[in-house]
Image (cartoon, rainbow, N blue to C red):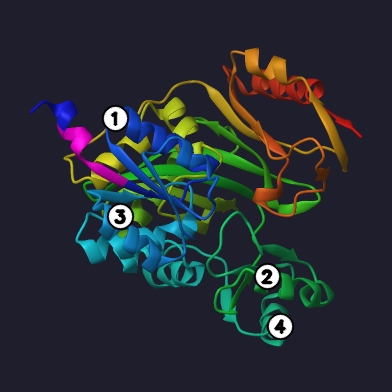
Amino acid sequence: MRQQDLKKNKKLMIIAGGDWQVPIIQKAKEMGYFVINSNLYEDSPGFKYADVGLVANVLDKEKNLEFAKEHKPDGIITDQSDIAVPTVAYICERLNLPGIGSEKAELFTNKFIMRTFCKENGFLYPEFRICSSCEKAKKFSRAIGFPVVIKPTSSQSSRGVFKVDNEKQLDQLYPEAQKFSFKNRILVEAFIGGHEITIEGISINKKHYSLVCSEKEHFKNNEMVASHLLYSHKNPRIPFEKAKELNDSLVDKMELPFGITHAEYKYYNGKYYLVEIAARGGGTKISSLIVPFMSGVNTNEILIKSALGEKIADINPLKNDKWAILDFFNFSKGLVKDTTGVDKLKTNPNVLDFGFIFSPGDVLQPPSDDRSRHGYFIAYEKTEEKLKMLCNLIKKETQIVYG
C-alpha cells in the first residue's frame, strides 16, 4: 500500500475548532489524514475544513471521549488552546494513544503548579500565593507590596488577569478575576517590571528546541493585554539566546515528551522570570504562521506526526535576518459602519495575514482581554526600522467608518 493511502487510513482528532485551529486542521488534511474536529458551536470555523465536525465543549472530557471511542482516531491533538490541553491528555490516556499525560497537562496549564515547580527546581518566579478570598489577597499584597497581579490559576486569553495598584482596585477586580476561575481560587503574585518576552518552541524525542523569541508590548489602557509582539533573532535590548537556553532547560526539566510550547518571561535587571509556559502554540497564528516563517520549522506538522506515533528526526532551526510582527489594531470606540484600507492589506507582499474581530453593526470598546482586541496583522521587513514604518503605514491606511 502506498504511503499516501496509509495516511488516508489514519484518523486524527483535533479538539477545539476556532479560527486559530483552522491552520492545523488544514495542515492535517494537506498531509493526507482524515480529520475529526470537536468544538462548542455548530458553526465552528474548523468544521468547514474537517471531514467530521462534532459539537462539544473542549472542557467536556467525557463527551469528547465518547466521540473518540465512536470514531477511533489514531491520534488526538490541539493547538493554540490552553483549555483543551487537559482534555486531549485525558482522552489519550484512556485510549492508550501518544500524549503528554494528565500530570504534565496540569503542570503546563495550572499557573500555581507551574510556580511551585519553578520554586522547587531553582527557576526564577514572582513571589506568589494562592488565595480563596479577597481578604487573603489583600493580606498577601500588603506583605509583598503593590502593585500585584491577580489571575485565575487556569484560564486563557488573559481573561481575569489584572494588574492591581492598591486595595481599592483589588476590591473591584478580585470578583472579576473569580468569574474565570474554575475552583474559586485566585493566584496573587508580585508585579515584575522590565521587558516581557515570548519564546516559541517544540519538544521532539524528549528534547526541547526554542525556535524564536518576541519582545512583547501592551496597550497603555490595559497592561495585561498585548498590543504587539516583535519577532527577531537578534534584539539589541534583550539577549534572546540566553532566554532560549533557560527555556530549553526549563522544558527539559518539566519532561514534556513531545509537543509545541509557548512561554512568556519577564526580563528584569538581567534576569528572566517565568510568567507562564504552555504545552501548545501561541494564538493568533503564532505557531502555524510566524514560527515556520522565522525558523523554517513547521511545528504543526511535527505535532501531527508525533501524535500519530511517527518517528521524528532531530531538527536544525534556521535563523534568518528578518523582523516580523504580530500587531493588534486598537480603534476608537463606536458603531462600525465599514472598514477602509482592506484592499491595501490584501495586496501588500509584506503582510502575511490579517483579520478583524468585528463586523459592521458591532460597537467597538477598548479591549479588556486578548479575545476582545479589534483585529490583527502579521507583517515582516528586513530591519526593525523598516518594520515600524510599515506598521505605521498600515494603521494609517486601515480605518473604521463609524455609523
Q: Is residue 47 above or below residue 88?
A: above
- Contact (Cβ within 8 Å) of mark 1 with mark 2: no
x, y percentage for residue 104?
Answer: 34, 64
Using the rendered view, name the quadrant where residue 306 is placed: top left
Which residue is pictured at 22% across the width and 45% down the height?
Answer: 308
- Contact (Cβ within 8 Å) of mark 2 with mark 4: no
Residue under label 3, please give it: 252
Which of the two discs, 2 and 4, labels the residue nearer the N terminus?
4
Residue that sits furthest to the right in the current view: 403
- Contact (Cβ within 8 Å) of mark 3 with mark 1: no
Name the kind of residue labelled 4 in the image.
Cys
Q: Disc 2 vs disc 4: which is toward the camera?
A: 2
Query: Is 10 covered by the magenta stretch?
Result: yes
Q: Secondary structure at mark 2?
A: helix
Which of the two discs, 4 and 1, labels the residue nearer the N terminus?
1
Total number of numbered discs in the rendering: 4
* Structural distance between the alpha carbons of marks 4 and 1: 51 Å
State left or right for residue 21 relative to residue 146: left
Name the kind of residue labelled 2 in the image.
Ala
* Structural distance between the alpha carbons of marks 2 and 4: 11 Å
Name the kind of residue labelled 1 in the image.
Met
- Contact (Cβ within 8 Å) of mark 4 with mark 1: no
